[in-house]
Image (cartoon, rainbow, N blue to C red):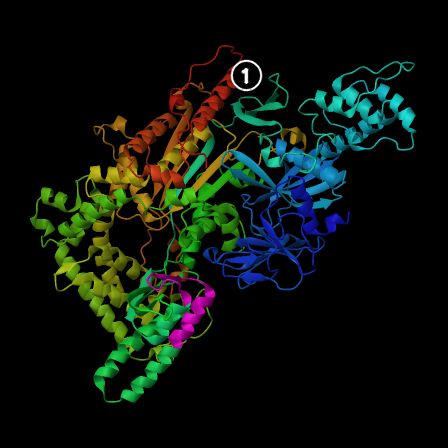
Amino acid sequence: QWTLMDRRKVYDLLESSGIDVPRHVYMSRDGYVSTGTGDGNGEGGDIIEHDDYIEINGVVIHKPFVEKPVDADDHDIAIYYPTSAGGGCKKLFRKVGDRSSEFYPMINDIRRDGSYIYEEFVETQGTDVKMYTVGPDYGHAEARKSPTVDGKVERNSDGKEVRFPVILSLREKEIARRIVIVFKQQVCGFDLLRVQQNDSLVSYVCDVNGWSFVKNSRKYYDDCAQILTEHMLAAVRPARLSCFSALDPLLTTMPDNQSTPKKERRKTASAMQRVSRMLQGVPEPEEDEEAPIIDDASLSSKRSDADAASTQAPTTLEEGAVPVSQIPHQLSVEPPSIVTSAASSVVDDGHEDVVSVKEPSTHKEELRCVIAVVRHGDRTPKQKLKLVMSEPRVLAYFHDHTKKPKKELKVKAKKPLEEFLKTIILMIAEKEAEAKAYGSKRKASNDSGQLLYKLRHMRDVLQRWKIGGLNRKLQIKPQKWDETVGENGEEIIKCTEVQLILKWGGNLTKLGERQAINLGQRIRHELYPDAPGGGILRLHSTFRHDLKIKTSDEGRVMKTAAASAKGLLELEGEIPPILVSLVHKEKDSIHMLDPSGNKEVKKELEICKKKINENLQKDVDFDKTSVEEHEQIVGPAELTSLHTALQEVKNPRKALFEIRAMMGDLLEQLDEMLGLMTSCDESNHEGGDGKEGESALSAVHIKLYKGETLLELTERWRLLYRKFYDEDTDTFDLSRVPDVHDNVRFDMLHNPHLGLTETLEKLYNMAKAMADCIVPQEYGTTILEKRSVGQKMCRLLLDKLKYDLVIARTDDQVDMRYMINMEYSADLPINTMGRRVRTRLYFTSESHLHTLLNVLRFTYDDPRSSSFILSEYGRALVDKTPELCYLTQIVFRLFEDPKKDMSDPKRFRIEILFSPGATATPLHMAEMDRDLDNSRFETDSLKLISKEGLSCQEVEEYFTDCIDQGKTDEDDDASVLCPPTSAENKKKGQELKDERQQKELTQNGQTQPAEADASGAKTVDANAS
């Protein structure tokens, strides 16, 4: 019992028993010495804290990580989040009312008093499992919403926390057996963290509670009564126990009666031996017969696989036990298969522990899966500031922080950024003093003034938020250096000139967050049956909803995904805990959702860019040119939106000059406003999540969004203006047109109080029309180019979408981490136990939405209706869409008609839906009424674009063709990051489908095997991650 009071001893004992625990390290300030891996390499003993990780005894633990006091009675547990998720700390505590945790955004530093365990945060899909044992061979597991998600405790009408019994794996049953024996706790509770690793279910034990039992489960107490009955009968009246239940008795773990003399004990079978005899079906001897003695060795050799989990088996690695991770990961009983029928009943198919459920079918079809690909939400403009200098202070900073003076230095961490800010502030003070000293020496003063202007800009950017490395990155690139030889003959390299590049911006705005939350709510109501009993929320809370959210590694994309999950699942609280608990960004998903990296794709994109620059700088009038000339400029006539935009632009070259002139007017107005003050008079105003303060434009008192200063805003536009047009070559950089559009839209939405509405409105209208001509062509200027770029850029995503459809169609158990235990069905308030829905949400950038749409709407085949998976209306709708705005969605819904035969391709039907996202115009959002304008929080409604009766088989075959056609020479390299498709996956998918077909035939009274599904030949051609 004392062992349980120290969490370090618990972890050490678990490790010695071959039980997996989260990767951890101890910070022991009381002299404790670990017998496991908790002390790392044993070096030092102090803790080194960095922005996103800590280092103790040579062990590095990255955020998010958990900080646990070693005292098991101290429940003040903290979780620290990385800066990429927004930082902050969540503190867990014993339930108080409906709260079990609270989030503190400003706490980022760990505690320095006492002893703690630091362990990696284990992602569990927002769920943890509480397991309860009664003896070594009985376990009851309940899943609940993890307190790490939003801290709200879900309670039922009786005020008890909502929990649901789930099926255990063989590994988890062995974990329970070892914990009971090693910790000597017959009635015991412990906490499991389940992680899906490819096709395997891995379970970590993160706490052992000792004496603990289930609060509210009739079956649990019935089982306990059965165990106690068998315990007593086996001990005192074994002859009365004619047969034995499936529950192994508690008595098998108890020692023989020590008071019995040794000689007598040899002649009389012990209680444990009598129980073992019963388990093997050996008849009891007559009372006058001498009972044959069965030794432990012979017992263990005869026991079945199910009976092997006893005290006879080793429980620690020292005794020869294998690590639990090497035990098969199968579930201990089969989950219910989803078979719908007109009547509800439990079907016994003659196999033990296999339960199929026939559900009452009130609908013609059942929704099986929802897959959505979504663009991120509204963001701030991405910006950078470049400055070449040879100032001694900057050079000294560079040499102090690099070991290789010829290589670029990247700075994102808190401490070095703070040091750089101090360096900049000192330089500003020196330059201001120099400016006064020069007096009438204009040339020197002007040079110093330009540098001073840039330094102030850099200072303002660094000071805008509390420094934490979030969404700011400093690069120092050496430009020139001197090489000398030292006294000892060593080479000495001193950098003499560097280029400073400061990058910031691209963050999800509060508007983007609100839009994403609203989108999640709309998805909940519109994509799932919104039944009175609770719809998707009901399924999710009862562990019949398998949700996976995957993103690229960009902060705005991850936060958009977390905000959408908040709306979808009706969660509370801040974004970082939800992001860390529910959003995945593994290497394979990052590679799948990040467009960068493929050289062949880049080459094709460069060709498209070159064509755009040539075609859209022509001095031609739309009204005076032919359709063929229009097609040369913006592509085929069926690309309606491009031709409409060109008609609005009228003359591309004249429109570009008008955009430049309007940008010049805007800069003049900003410079005039800037003249009312100097940069050094400004103080920062956060406006969202940065430092508090007052940003005053002296007389005009303007506060800008997110603490941006007027100087920064002016420089943002000045940089665009300078790069937009090259006077020497008389050419425009058309890649800057989308940037102009993004910037003017941002200022109209977030800075409408600048008093520049008229200028911004004119610039917005011109920039939008031009951007609508350019952006769609960046991913192909012809249909063949669009198809080619789309297939190559989206190849991995198409592979994953196909895999998701195959798994959902074959009713596989992959990724179904929490299966409700059907043995408890009588106690659960659930009518349709077998109903399960999968949801896969993929959040990415605009490029993937453009290229995926191009793949869906364009085919190499003859333009016949049968060769497309989109309807004529759907293709026309996409063709007319001018812009894929923030939160654009492409959605796939898989339905099953259970009345159709398994071999019928039409049994599984696909719907494809499309929304261009948050298309509300920013023109009318003036300061006075913008907060009352709910349209800016909404996205366009989803429209059905797939053809009628589209089967899942058609979509899978279409995706297969696209995947094959999109293969490039670099795919072998890409497979390193995204595991290749395995033959085992293909075989497993086919076997699962065949098994399901045979099961349904059996239930329908048929004996002959059905014909194979036509789509079976192409089952599972994607990685299982």
Residue placed at 73% from the left, 38% from the top? 180
Point out the stretch of residues depicted in magenta. Answer: 401-425
Q: Position of residue 2 (x, y in %)?
A: 77, 49
Magenta stretch holds residue 404? yes
> In which image quadrant can residue 586 be found?
top left
Q: Position of residue 668 (x, y in %)?
A: 23, 73
Tell me: residue 676, above or below residue 815. below
| Residue with the most extreme left position | 624
Q: Does 345 sit left or right of 568 as displayed?
A: right
Secondary structure type for disc 1: helix
Residue bearing mark 1: 1003
Q: Does 842 sit left or right of 116 as displayed?
A: left
Residue type, mark 1 in image: Gln
Q: Residues within 10 Å of mark 1 (few under 14, many from 20)?
A: some
Q: Does 526 sit left or right of 1004 as displayed?
A: left
- Whether residue 582 is visible here, answered yes or no, is yes
The foreground one among 703 and 462 is 462
